[in-house]
Amino acid sequence: MVFESRGWEIDLARRELRARGSPVPIGNRAFEIIETLVRSAGELVTKDDLMSRVWPGAIVGDNTLQVHISAIRRAFGADRGMLKTVAGRGYRLLGDWTIRERSAPAKRPSGSQVRTASHPFLTNVPVAASALIGRETAVQHLRDLLSAYRVVTLAGPGGIGKTVLASEVARRLVPALESDVLLVELVSLSDPELVPSAVASTLDLQLRGDEMSPAAVARALGGRKVLLLLDNCEHVIDAAATMAETLLRLCPHATVLATSREVLRIEGEVVYRVPPLEVPAEDLEASDEVLEHSAVQLFVARTRSLRSDFQPQADKLPVIGSICRQLDGIPLAIELAAARAATLGIQQVAGRLDDRLALLTGGRRTALPRHQTLRATLDWSYELLPEPERRLLRQLAIFPAGFTLEAAMAVSGDSESSVALGISSLVTKSLVALDGSEAARRWRLLETVRVYAFEKLADSGDQGQVVRRHAEFCLSLFAPFAVEGELQAAIDDLARFRREVDNLRAALSWAFSACGDTSLGVALAATATDFWVAVSLVAECCEWAGKALAALGEAAGTYHEMVLQCGLGFALIFTQGMGAAPREALIRTLSLARQSGDFDYQQRATYGLWLFSARAMALDDALAFAREYEEVARVRGLQSRAMAAWLVGIPQTYLAAHDEAGERLRWAIDHYPVERRRRDMIRFASDLRASAMSHNTVNLLSQGLVAAASQTAMSAIEEARRTNQPTVLCVALAWAAGFVFLSLDELELAQGCGEELVDHAERHALHPFHAVGLCVQGALAARRGDPEGGVAPLRSGLAEMARAVYLLFYPFFRAELAAALAASGLLDDGLGEIDEALRFAETSGYLWFVPEILRIKGELLARRGLDDPAPIEDLFRRSMAQARAQKATYWELSSATSLAEHLCRHNRQAEAGAVLSPVYGRLTEGLSAPRVKRARALLDRLA
């Protein structure tokens, strides 16, 4: 029976779909779906009905059905609309179908073999030597493809496991298919003309030598049912493609499963690119999670097969994960590495992967010669390439982070069409992979392929020209970061530039190497200075700016030196602290900027010197630089005026001018142009909004606006998170944990912020903030009843602050250390520390915290049990007086509470109430804060 409509024929007897008389390749299951639909005469067939008719008794997922529906639509081509989906219900086949009862007589090829029910189906696919690891999903997907399409090609680079996977699929299909399943090994063929002979021999077809051709083989095969596995097609690709295409055209019941590093490119072919095995992420350390990845499982299994007592320890699993990741999850490379690990040990293999091509040898004796070593595998692919593609592959090896078409053109020097065609060909041959989405148009070489191709580049004599072109391309690519008018656009497109980090590193490494070009390196390092800050790699800004400044040569005194000195100054402040080097770099920047009349870098350098002075607690200097910035800002617009208000407001905060400081910081937040925010974060390595909010918490807390201080601290952290800048977040976390929540005795909040601060600072090598985090941990331990445990981290953190000359938190945590020492029984040591904290605060102008230092000293003296209580009372009253002068209601309340408790201990309850009640009465919010509740409880007892 044949159904006909608009040139299409569905021949049920021959199980054939034809378009205008020509057979269209389609798999058996897909044909059964078409048959079910055409018999329904245009009526809806539900998904459940289709699956029960085509896969009776089997459990089939929606994905399997979708694969076959896609195959049918592909077969219908321009008429794909005939297969209509009814959303959520099923499918119907449209068209005016007529029925012709008899099929056209089939041409019976001479010599064809007809199988009978008594004739057994054959297979020569070998039994698996070991379990297949990590490919279960791929096996199932390929089984679905083979039931929907008649030619499926497994493509991928050498060693990815195409043959092993295809053989496993073929073995599993043997019980399910009513056909022969035969493997044709093409690897040993040196002459493409021998392909038909190899196929005929495997099929046991009796053909004379003079009639051996793809067509002759197909005619001899005729209507015989067979799944033919054509293995290793790449070196005879044209002949293999012709053979497969002829079989599809002339043999209605033949299906081809091919493996090749290059796709066949024939009609009806579906390509399955064999993926690498799963590798663990770089930051994954939990041993049970590392073992869940198939690449690690393969490594462990193969090592154990060579050393039966092998049992990886938990601390070695991340190392194995790293090995697998560096080998791109390629099974052959992992097996070779496992073989080496069985004799040399895991650590030795991990340490020698830079020389992987020499290390990864010694494959199984029975393996193909090109699978004995990693180099032989790559040699096989490389030698199959025409010279233009070899040259392009060598040139592309210069890109460790992948490349765009523009980048490839820059290093090759060839035309766009030539390079595009070359990349396309290398992709089809599995030597280059698309990296990301099609829209991004970016490619990469697997790292093992890149290492091999880079060796070839070094041997070719072209390396010098290619690496220079690469560095020059990076210079032009990152140029927008060095142009004030283009910086914002570059920041908006930061994700694109971020992908180029390793390419930039490679270019800089070459430029400053013995065979590089230092003048090009200086220009590139200067151009990339703001980029390193933008992507939060401040330590790298330090490294490359330092190298460039050491190699300035004729660039001394130029714009490039000014940019490099500025970048180095800021980077050193954030990573190492307030030493002599960052100050000298920023002074040199300011000098060069003034000489050249560069207002942008005058502002940057002035801000940098302000930051240095503020963090070193040279508050008078900080105010002077802030005023200088104000002068420049008068002609630079609203953004500069907001910056000036911020810079003046911060030192005023520590000088305890809380009203004026708070007003300036709020004005800065309200009037700062939001559209300049990301740009200024890079120019100044800070964020005005998050910083101003963080510093203003000191004013709010001191003024007794407790709830507002707490809320502002949390808001500052959220603002900082949105910037995705580590230094900005560290500022917000440090002020929240180090000042606000410890001062409010909100220990849980302080702990959460402190832990995040330490983690963030360690991850980004921000040592000054790490010091703050250590001190927070020590203070929390002491306050929670373990003062001895708190002393060590407090001492360590303070020492780190002193080394970095990062002193904004220094008096605060010396007071915490004093309290911890006293609680540990070391009262004299504690008193010594509190005196040092007071001396430092008074001489540096750190006045806002003086009332609290005086209060803590009074509490320590009270521990001593003096016969004369007057010195203690005097300290508390001095503390209250200073706090009242600063309009610092919170610190006045703290001191008033301590004084009231002291008076109560000496039976002066009436005086205690008179001291505490009026201060408490001035509070308007934050009544649930621990210190405020302590005062309220005391007043209640006194009442």
Image (tube, rainbow, N blue to C red):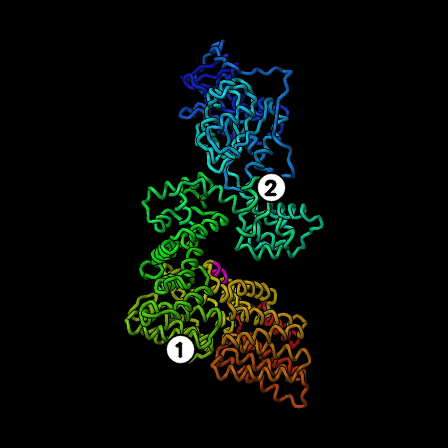
Q: Which residue is mark 1?
A: 623
Q: Position of residue 613 (x, y in %)?
A: 43, 76
Taking 24 as reference, is 543 above or below it? below
Could you tell me what secondary structure mostly forms the magenta stretch?
helix
Dot 2: element: loop
Q: Is the C terminus in the top left, top right, bottom left or bottom right quadrant?
A: bottom right
Looking at the picture, tell me which residue is in the foreground, 371 or 652.
Answer: 371
Looking at the picture, tell me which residue is in the foreground, 618 or 635.
Answer: 618
**Kind of residue sitting beneath label 2:** Gly
Mark number for residue 867?
A: none
Q: What span is colored magenta in the figure?
A: 716-721
Q: Residues within 10 Å of mark 2 (few under 14, many from 20)?
A: some
Using the rendered image of the protein, determine whether residue 455 is visible from the camera's viewpoint: yes
Taking 361 as reference, is 942 above or below it? below
**Kind of residue sitting beneath label 1:** Leu
Mark number for residue 134?
A: 2
Q: Is residue 905 magenta?
A: no
- In the picture as drawn, the residue positioned furthest to the right comes out as 309
Disc 2 to disc 1: CB gap under 8 Å: no
Q: Residue at x 30, y 71 (%)?
A: 634
Q: CA distance from mark 2 to mark 1?
A: 64 Å
Taking 470 as reference, is 822 above or below it? below
